Each structure stands twice: as C-alpha cells, then as structure tokens.
Amino acid sequence: MAEPNVLVKVENLKQYFPIKRGLLQRVVGHIKAVDGVSFDIYEGETLGLVGESGCGKTTTSRAILQLYRPTAGKVYMEGRDLTAMQGEELRQMRTRMQIIFQNPYSSLNPRMTVGRILTEPMQVHGVAKGKEAQERVAELLHLVGMNPYFVNRFPAEFSGGQRQRIGIARALTVNPSFIICDEPISSLDVSIQAQIVNLLKKLQRELGLTYLFISHDLSMVRFISNRMAVMYLGKIVELAPSEEIVTTPLHPYTQALWSAAPIPDPEIEESRERIVLEGDVPSPANPPKGCRFHTRCPQAMDICRQEEPLLQELQPGHWVACHRYGN
C-alpha cells in the first residue's frame, strides 16, 4: 500500500503566553498552553484531537493557522514552512487552510447579510467578484444544504444549525484543501449535531478535504476521524487509528476518558468499570515535573514523577507517551 502524502506537518510546536504583573507589567512566568506537540495530518484524512477543556486543543489549531505566532517549533503546509512566512506570502497560503469556529452565534458578523459574508473572502483573496462571486455564493449555499434565496438575510434570522452551515460555506469560499473544525457541533442541539457531521463527511468525499476535528464528544470523533490524538496539559499522550484508540487505549488518561464516555447499550454500560480521576488538571503556568499526568494517574510510578516520557511508537501507527511501556 502506498504511503499517504503528508499535507500538514507539526514539529515540536510550543505556544507560551506571558504572565505579567505589577505597574511595569513585568513578565513573571508563562502559561505553557502547547508545549512540544508533533504530529502529521495526511491528505484526505480526518485527524481527531480530543482532551479536557484547557488542555491546549484550540490553541494548537490557532498556532497551526498562524493566528497565534508560535513561540517555537515548525508548521509545514504542503511542504512549506508557515512559521517562516510573513505578509503577502502568508496571506496567499490562507486560501489553502481555513477554520470553522465553535460558536456560530459569535463567528458571523450580525451586520452583514449572508451574501456579503460569503463574497467578502472571495474579494479579499481575489478568487471571484461580481456575477461570478454571486453564482459561487448560490453554489456554496446549495452545497451546504441551504436555500440560495437566503443571500439577503442576516445571521439573526437563522437557527444555530443554519448559522453553522453558513460558517462551513464561508470556509469553503476560497477553495481550501485543509480545514480545522474547532468544536463545530458543541454549541448545537443534539438533533442537529449528526446533520452537521454528516455534511462535513459528505463535503470531504466530494471536495477531497483534509480535516483537523477538535471535539469533547469522543463518540462523534470516533465516527468522523481516521486517527485520533489525545491531549493532556499541552502534550499529546496518545496517537493512533481511531478504532484502535477506542478498543485498546494504552495511556491511563485515554483509558479514563473512554471509561467516562457513555455507551448506548445498557448491559455494557452497567458492566464496565469506571476510572474516576482524582483532583483537577494542574495549571499550565506551573505544570508538574516528569509526566504531567502523574498527579492524577492511578498507575503512577516513581519514574513518572521525575522523568518526562517520550512519545514512542509501540505498534505500527500507535504512539504513546507513558513510562509503563518503557523507553
């Protein structure tokens, strides 16, 4: 089988935010939101990114797109280093990568009509204008399952699910090859969530898109993604094919996450063992020494408190950062 092409390559990505205090706003420390993350995203696949709130998922996505300029590390898109780009060169690359935001209520300008929301990116990037842009808007609305006659309406006239469809259409206006879906279903009704995920899968098949899908909903990530990366406190602790992570999770944190996810089968749900984690997630401003999960890990050893485990490939395509499996 041919090796899949790497579309996006992330190498040792770090994103630190300064903590400032006092009248002179001196820097007294850093919030290590993302601290040495590396992974590849293959052409045409969906990589799911999961983890608790505050673990660095959204910050990772914004650093990949250069909405935050990374503190350290490299991000390659189609073999080109985004972190080395500035100005016009980076602006041109933005047509290749887009984002669907979490909240459709705040990500659309309430003063702009749907037509204007969708034509503006085309005009900014010189993709289309005039009648061609209008035709493209009608085509995009049809593509996301909305009536093209809605072009003169404002976002306030739509439901959350319809607004998210407009957000998806906006991401497609500049013909990207890579789209980051930043929890695109978390603020929607459960009845609408499946519709949006099915739409994303349909668009991926038809347009050959590549996704980084960020979500708290593990069952939804399992459904949409080919591979899954599990994040904890700014680090990736496990990365493997989605089905493998579900059936044989290796890292204690991944095992705890899956034990908390509900299963729609009362017999299995009743018989399985819950792993309840003690305490709270430590502060990213002062992460624990050694393995960051050791303060809550039910299987922690002495070495976990001293040395940070390396992300290593235990089986083909299955990476884990845990001292239980040796180095």
Image: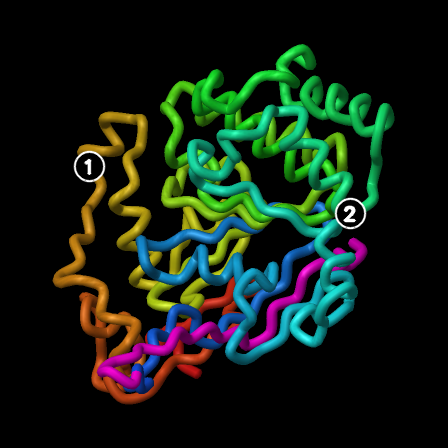
Q: Could you tell me the amino acid type at mark 1?
A: Ser
Q: Quadrant of residue 277?
A: bottom left
Mark 2 nearby-residue class (10 Å; few <14, some 14–19, many ≥20): some
Q: Name the residue under label 1.
A: 271
Give the camera-side residue of 144 and 211. Answer: 144
Q: Circle 2 is placed at which residue position?
A: 125
| Residue at (49, 46) in percent of width and height | 182
Q: Does the segment drawn in magenta span residue 15?
A: yes
Residue drawn at 18 percent across, 33 percent down:
270
Q: Quadrant of the C terminus?
A: bottom left
Choose between 318 and 221: the one closer to the eye: 221
Residue 205's disc number: none
Quote the CA–CA distance across marks 2 and 1: 55 Å
In this rendered view, identify the residue nearer to me: 246 or 67. Answer: 67
Q: Is the magenta stretch mostly helix, strand or loop?
A: strand
Q: Is residue 90 magenta?
A: no
Q: Is residue 24 above or below residue 299?
A: below
- Where residue 8 sits in the image (x, y, percent)? 68, 61
Quarter containing the N terminus? bottom right
Q: Where is residue 110 in the image (x, y as percent from the top left)?
A: 49, 30
Give the magenta-colored segment's residue range: 1-24
Q: Residue 13 location, x and y as percent?
A: 53, 73
Lower sequence index among marks 2 and 1: 2
